[in-house]
Image: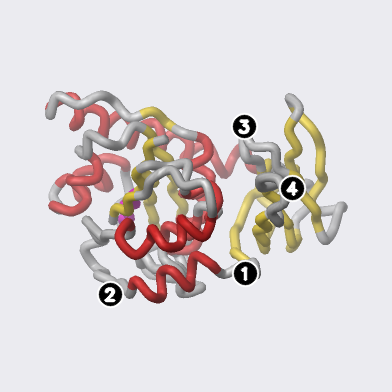
Amino acid sequence: MEFKSKHILASLAAALYLLTAFLPVASEAAYKPTFSMKEAVQDASKAVPEREKITRSLGAVLSYPGRQVSFAVSDPEIGEIFQENGEYRVRLRRPGKVLVHVVFPQGKGALPLVRQLECEVTGQQSGKDSTAASSYARQVLKLCNEERKKAGLEPLRLDEELTGYAEIRAEETTRKFAHVRPNGKYCSSIIPFSYFTRFRHYGENLAGGQTTPEQAVQGWMNSPGHRANILNPRYKLLGLAYVYRPDSQFKHYWVQQFGTR
């Protein structure tokens, strides 16, 4: 699935632009949502933040590299706010549930954008839990760039911001395997609306059930829509996530978030 957008200075202009800019190009093979432009505009203009459920391992850190965001947490014993390299971050230090408010400052005179992350912290240490996921991400990036090289395209660069969005989407797909999120919004809403104008192009690939990076990438390459995203010359950046949930429908979930700034 791909969405296009142009740089826009005002949220009103951005909302109006959605009438012509949100054009679905490639959708997940097992799910083809019907898009309503009217609903897209209403969805994008909602100011009240909804909670996004995520799962992270003990010791994981929530951050938005390069973004001057601030945080507030419901339980400092579970989520510890700290600074590193001039940026605020949240370290998950105990198992449990914590509500994390992420505040994105806007332009002069504009209200800040707020995201609410309902985070469940598991008892397993992040280092052990994330080894396979990070290794898989590197392999997926390598395999995709090999396919792009065959097509004479520039390689994709792994992007931390898009990877953060991919991680949230991976958790969501364990509950609803679709390009429409569990809250009923389109997958593009994973990007804070004011930041969506930072991306000239955006797309998403999903896969479920594949147990290795090779299987995931091969499945995408065998699907015209997913292949089009991987070989799209407009994309320069890639965010990747993999999660394993043995008690869910597909058990293995893979997410690619494509973008161009």
The amino acid beneath tag 1 is: Glu
Report the magenta residues as a range: 203-207
Q: Position of residue 116 (x, y in %)?
A: 67, 61
Q: Earlier in the sequence, mark 3 or mark 4?
A: 3
Q: Which quadrant holds residue 67?
A: top right
- CA gap, disc 3 to disc 4? 20 Å
Quadrant the N terminus occupies? bottom left
Residue 205 inside the magenta-drawn segment: yes
- CA gap, disc 4 to disc 2? 38 Å
Q: Is residue 103 left or right of residue 184?
A: right
The amino acid beneath tag 4 is: Leu
Q: Is residue 212 left or right of residue 162?
A: left
Which residue is under mark 4?
92
Which residue is under mark 1?
50
- CA gap, disc 1 to disc 3? 24 Å
* Nearest to the observer: residue 39 or residue 98: 39
- CA gap, disc 2 to disc 1? 22 Å
Q: Earlier in the sequence, mark 1 or mark 3?
A: 1
Residue 122 visible in the picture: no
- CA gap, disc 2 to disc 3? 35 Å
Q: Which residue is at a point 33% across and 55% down the rendered structure image?
A: 206
Q: Earlier in the sequence, mark 2 or mark 3?
A: 2
Q: Earlier in the sequence, mark 2 or mark 1?
A: 2
Q: How many marks?
A: 4
The amino acid beneath tag 3 is: Gly
Q: Position of residue 183 (x, y in %)?
A: 51, 73
Which residue is under mark 3?
66
Q: Earlier in the sequence, mark 4 or mark 1?
A: 1
- CA gap, disc 4 to disc 1? 21 Å
